[in-house]
Image (cartoon, coloured by chain):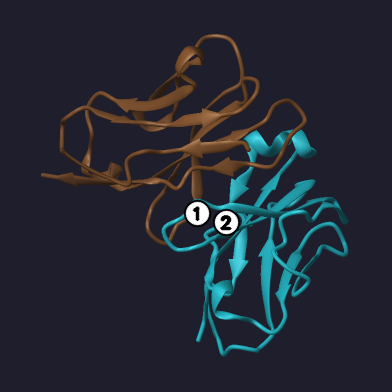
Amino acid sequence: AQSVTQPDIHITVSEGASLELRCNYSYGATPYLFWYVQSPGQGLQLLLKYFSGDTLVQGIKGFEAEFKRSQSSFNLRKPSVHWSDAAEYFCAVVPGAGSYQLTFGKGTKLSVIP
Amino acid sequence: GAGVSQSPRYKVAKRGQDVALRCDPISGHVSLFWYQQALGQGPEFLTYFQNEAQLDKSGLPSDRFFAERPEGSVSTLKIQRTQQEDSAVYLCASSLRDRAGVAEAFFGQGTRLTVV
């Protein structure tokens, strides 16, 4: 069965420190990959997406993610975290072109300490 | 409106009560999706509309769940005879394009349903 795994339920980082959130997927082929952020009481906001091409993808708010086919991973990174980045982060996939059912991981809650 | 609007934002229902959750997508958006997000979980797909046509309802958990989008704009998700396991945040998303437009979908803030 297709699945998305976010191994870290909760991560705490200091403001200004670097961040990496992990995401692994289980699909037969390379899916389309997404990272979303959800602040308390808010809907999901798309940070970035990968369909094909350059495996390092730049997104909004200074985030980037790297697709590694050999590891079936799509980890999210930010070089310097701001207090406003505290939120829940979801990795999601669709199987490929023409697909529309997003399959989400369980999310990683990010806390930022001053 | 500027974004996807959902109402009510919060709903408390007694077990066995029927509820209706509304989604106002961005004007002109063709695709509309409903997701269910249980506490501590990621959202799970419920159903997909392209204009007024419900093309996929494979994620609806039971026949107590019903969704409609009669004029291809506003959508309503109805849950009959609510049960405690229905407690979740229900998210609506819309996209300008057809099914491939999921990548450009905008999500609403959700309706938090609590069944007591």
The chain letter corresponding to cyan is B
Asked if B88 appears above or below A13 in the picture, the reply is below
Q: Residue at x 61, y 14 (%)?
A: A52
Q: Is residue A5 toward the left or the right of residue A104 in the image?
A: left
Crowding around mark 1 (Cα neighbors within 10 Å: few <14, some 14 to 19, many 20+) is many
The answer to which quarter of the image holds residue A104 is top right
In which quadrant will I find the C terminus of chain A? top left
Comparing B62 with B19, the one in front is: B62
Asked if B11 appears above or below B97 in the picture, the reply is below
Q: Label 2: chain?
A: B
Q: Is residue B69 toward the left or the right of residue A48 in the image?
A: right
Comparing B83 with B17, the one in front is: B83
Crowding around mark 2 (Cα neighbors within 10 Å: few <14, some 14 to 19, many 20+) is many
Q: Which mark is residue A43?
A: 1
Q: Residue furthest top?
A: A54
Provide residue B63's location: percent of width, then percent of height: 78, 71
Residue at the spot of label 2: B108
For badge 1, the amino acid type reads: Gly
Residues at marks 1 and 2 touching, judged by CB atoms closer than 8 Å: yes
* The hue in which chain A appears in the rendered picture of the protein: brown
Mark 2, secondary structure of its residue: loop
Q: Is residue B112 visible?
A: no
Q: Residue furthest front?
A: A1
Asked if A101 appears above or below A32 in the picture, the reply is below
In which quadrant will I find the N terminus of chain A? top right
Comparing A81 with B3, the one in front is: A81
